[in-house]
Image (tube, rainbow, N blue to C red):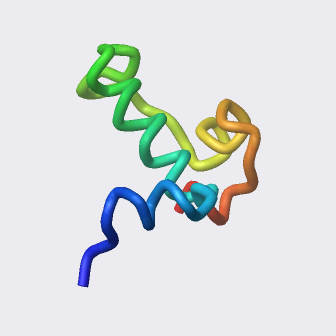
C-alpha cells in the first residue's frame, strides 16, 4: 500500500531517494542531456555520497 503524503513527510528522505530526485531534476532542468556520459563515481562525487546509493 503506498504511503500517504503525511507518512512520507514524517520519515527522513533516504540517500537513494534524494539522489534520484536530484538527478531527475537535473534532467528536467536540461543540466543532463541525452548522450551525456557520466559514471557512478561522477554522480557520487557531485551528490556528496558513496557509489552504493547512486546505484
**Residue farthest along the front direction in this orientation:** 6
Q: Which quarter of the figure has residue 39? A: top right
On the image, the x and y values in percent for residue 25 come to: 37, 28
Q: Residue at x 63, y 58 (%)?
A: 12
On the image, the x and y values in percent for residue 8 come to: 44, 61
Choose between 52 and 2: the one closer to the eye.
Answer: 2
Q: Residue at x 48, y 35 (%)?
A: 22
On the image, the x and y values in percent for residue 34 come to: 24, 26
Q: How many marks?
A: 0
**Residue farthest along the bottom direction in this orientation:** 1
**Residue farthest along the top direction in this orientation:** 30
Q: Is residue 23 positioned above or below 31 on the image?
A: below
On the image, the x and y values in percent for residue 55 come to: 53, 62
Q: Is residue 5 positioned above or below 40 on the image?
A: below
Q: Is residue 29 positioned above or below 35 on the image?
A: above
Q: Is residue 14 left or right of residue 33?
A: right
User: Considering the image in quadrants, where does the N terminus appear?
Assistant: bottom left
Amino acid at each position: 500500500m503506498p504511503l500517504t503524503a503525511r507518512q512520507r513527510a514524517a520519515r527522513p528522505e533516504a540517500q537513494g531517494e534524494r539522489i534520484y530526485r536530484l538527478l531527475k531534476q537535473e534532467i528536467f532542468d536540461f543540466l543532463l542531456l541525452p548522450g551525456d556520459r557520466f559514471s557512478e563515481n561522477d554522480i557520487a562525487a557531485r551528490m556528496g555520497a558513496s557509489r552504493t546509493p547512486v546505484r
